[in-house]
Amino acid sequence: MKKVKIGPTPIVIATVIFLGFLLWLFFNVLKPADSLTIAEAKEIVQDMYGGDITEVSETNEAYLFTIKTKSGLYDIYVQRKDGDILKVDQKNPEPAEAPNEQTLPEDKIKEIIHDQYGGEINRLEKKREGDRYFYYAVLNDGQSNQTIKVDAQTGSIVESSGKTSNGITEQDAAGIALQQVKGKVEDVDLKESDGLKYYLVEIESDQDQEATVQIHSITGEVLSITWDD
């Protein structure tokens, strides 16, 4: 009896070809192309932005680098296929550095306020404004509360508020006058002329000159400054 050789049937051949096509499709089309290594992507980021890379992660499409620069932290997304920068996100900005200055202690500020205004300090708080620090004191002089702002570095009175309708006190007038003329208060007198009440504050300046500051007794406005010859 003659034996008949049985070879691959057309169906088997077609199946093999189809499977081969699927494998080619997966490896050449469907699978993400890692044409850019993580080292190459890192080099691109550092060349473009500088700074220090603190974290590295990856997805199917991109590398994610967290980079620290002088202006803050950033997340930079680099496309794996061709190295394009997909997105740059700034993370929480780093707080600005505190002012680099020596400030006066609270005891010294209290002494300055007491010498110029008297009264009792109910609250004292230091606050930062821009690149400087200031003390805010709430002072009770027996008649009202007022807020006094003091430069924390120099100890100078910047401003005061909260006067009553009865007008300012002698201590208030002295403090206002010292904002205009730096020195030592020699005398404070309450005067009246043509119905206008005002304080005359005599000051010996730091330059050994004598000045008289005229201050409105109600509003605290400086009306004039005269210098003795």
Image: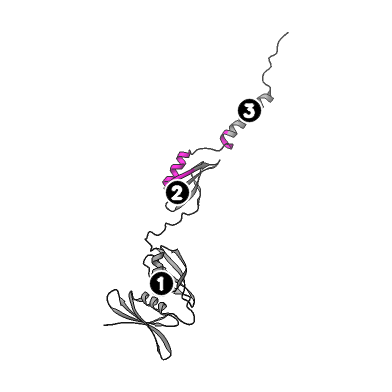
* Front residue of 93 and 35: 93
Secondary structure, mark 1, is helix
Q: Residue at x 60, y 31 (%)?
A: 23
Question: Magenta includes 167?
Answer: no
- The amino acid type, in three-letter code, at marker 1 is His
Residues under numbered marks 2 and 3 in contact, where contact means CB atoms less than 8 Å apart: no
Count of numbered circles on the image:
3
| Residue behind mark 2 | 68
Q: What x and y, as percent, mark residue 222?
A: 39, 80
Q: Which residues are magenta?
A: 27-55
Circle nearer the N terminus (2, 3): 3
Task: Return the x and y of residue 201 as percentages of the image width and height.
Answer: 36, 81
Label 1: few (<14), some or many (≥20) within 10 Å?
some
19 vs 205, left or right, is: right
* SS state under label 2: strand
Residue that extends furthest to the right in the rendered view of this protein: 1
Residue at the disc numbered 3: 17
The image quadrant where one finds the N terminus is top right
Q: CA distance from mark 1 to mark 3?
A: 98 Å
Q: Dot 2, how many residues are within 10 Å of its Cα: few (below 14), some (14-19), or many (20+)?
A: some
- In the rendered view, would you say 73 is above or below 113? above
Give the labeled residue for mark 1: 114
Displayed quadrant of residue 15: top right
Assess whether mark 1 and mark 2 are in contact (beta carbons under 8 angstroms): no
Q: Element under label 3? A: helix
Q: Mark 1 or mark 3, which has the lower sequence index?
A: 3
